[in-house]
Image: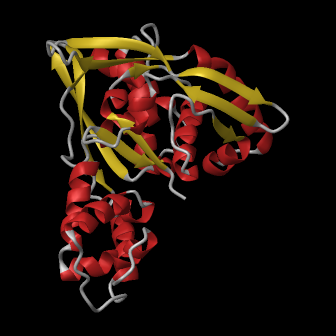
Amino acid sequence: MSDLVVKDNALISASYSLDLIEQRLMLLAITQARETGLGITENSLLEVHAAAYINCFDVDKSTAYRALKEASKGLFDRYVTYHDKNPKNGRDRSFHCRWVDKIGYEEQSGLVYLRFTQDVVPLITRLEENFTRYELHQIAKLSSTYAIRLYELLIRWRSIGKTPIMELVEFRNQLGVKPNDYKLMSDFKKRVLDLSVKLINDFTDIRVEYTQHKNGRSISGFSFKLKQKPNLTAETTGKVTLRDINTVDMFHKLTEKQLDMFSSKLADLPTVQAMAHVGEDMKPFVARLRSMLMDAEQQKVLLPYLKEVGYTAA
């Protein structure tokens, strides 16, 4: 099963405050909808069971039941602020909307039911060029909601390896830090920034360092450098390449229609998604898979996966 989280970059850059349990619950709902193949629409009543929470975040049963019960109470009142451009005049605009319009908890079963609002659904389902994706297990051990948000913000830039300067006020909002929390820079760095960086470096697939920028004597923002941890990249590449290199000794010539169809299908397979370059968006990834299918040697790598998505040799 895939534990892939996909979010539109408008949502990645949005401002919202969720506590750790609420953040985890939202991410589980997104990934489980993908795993079951049900997808997410504004009419989808999604289910998250305590067992999934236990398995993903390594907590005991009583903790999971209690956490989901509390999260189901608070999540209904949470909202997100996101920005886009007016298609008519190109001007920036901001919107506030709730995450969910319906949420319930079945106490005896440890089961949460939730339905995302019609405004949020497109931001977590569109597979266009403006999206960020990562696997849920990368953030499973992050014990701070700020660390999860920072990880999401940073991986938007991992193909480049560095971020632009994030202005302090906007950066705090994006992390979900409330205006009256950690107002002293020393507190913000200790309780939010340094802790988040340490957790990301210890438990995820990237290594991060930051630079602080000043306006006069005051810190006005931060920029980050990040790189993929080499051992994880090697493991992922090895799993995909070594498995397949000797599985076929002939080239299968595909029609244009087949190239379009199977490159898109392959891009949805979690095993093939491991072949994506760090930070690579869906559209260029599909195009690269299409090119691979037209190359005799590279097609060998993809043939076992082609069979998984329904290809049969003529």
Screen quadrant of the N terminus: bottom right
Query: Residue 93, how many percent across, how many down?
Result: 26, 12
- Image coordinates for residue 65, horizontal then vertical, percent: 76, 35
**Res. 272 image quadrant:** bottom left
Q: Of all residues shown, which one is farthest toward the top?
A: 180
**x%, y% of residue 279?**
27, 49
> Would you place residue 312 above or below residue 285 in this image?
below
Q: Is residue 300 left or right of residue 15?
A: left
Camera-side residue: 214 or 78? 78
Q: Nearer the viewer, residue 264 or 141?
A: 264
Left or right, residue 120 beside residue 237: right
- Quarter placement of the C terminus: bottom left
The picture places residue 41, in percent across and down from the top left corner, at 50, 33
Residue shown at 26% from the left, 37% from the top: 130
In the rendered view, would you say 1 is above or below 85?
Answer: below
Location of residue 97 (image quadrant): top left
